[in-house]
Amino acid sequence: MLDRLKSPKGATKKKTRVGRGEGSGLGKTSGRGGKGQTARTGGNIKPGFEGGQMPLQRRLPKRGFTNIFREKYRIVNVGTLAEAFKSGEAVTPETLLGKGLIKGKTGLVKVLGDGEIKIALNVKANVFSKSAEDKIKAAGGAAEVI
């Protein structure tokens, strides 16, 4: 049976042979347009090259600066904590990461005061907003800075 195996009709296609006369549709310039660098073999132009003119990315002025000491915060709201944890549970960066409430293993954890919290939670984070701290304490919980 193996000697009679064939591809299904339409599965194989002949390779286009360029430069084989005008009647083929790809004669003369072989689909490469006119003359010049791009018509040549190995002729490629780098992205952003403008034919010798000063490229746009070099013409524009450099602005601003990046602060290499910037601290990245992973943010979570008190409303989210109330939905994800039970009363009296300890909330740490590790438990938040485990429940998928914050992403990434690096960066400080900041708790913001968006939402309502009615259960007492012992929250440990790097930074608390004033409203978040007030809401956690009003619900009978504790906000501990680590």
Image (cartoon, grey):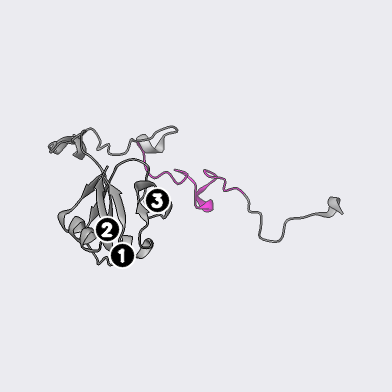
140 with respect to 14 (left or right): left
- The magenta stretch is 15-36
Q: Picture coordinates of residue 17 (x, y %)?
A: 57, 45
Determine which of the numbered discs, if any, sits on residue 82 in the image. none
Confirm or deny contact between disc 2 and disc 1 (CB under 8 A).
yes
Residue type at mark 3: give it: Thr
In the picture of the structure, the residue carrying the numbered disc 2 is 141
Mark 1 or mark 3, earlier in chain = 3
- Of tags 1 and 3, the one toward the viewer is 1
Residue 113 seen in the figure: no
Say which element carries label 2. loop
What is the number of the mark on residue 95?
3
Q: Label 1, on which residue? A: 119
Q: Between 30 and 105, which is closer to the camera in this rendering?
A: 105
Label 1 CA crowd tier, 10 Å (few <14, some 14–19, many 20+): some
Q: Are marks 3 and 2 in contact (CB under 8 Å)?
A: no
Give me the residue at 27% from left, 39% from top. Answer: 48
**Residue depicted at 28% across the width and 67% down the height:** 118
The picture quadrant where one finds residue 37 is top left
Q: CA distance from mark 1 to mark 3?
A: 17 Å
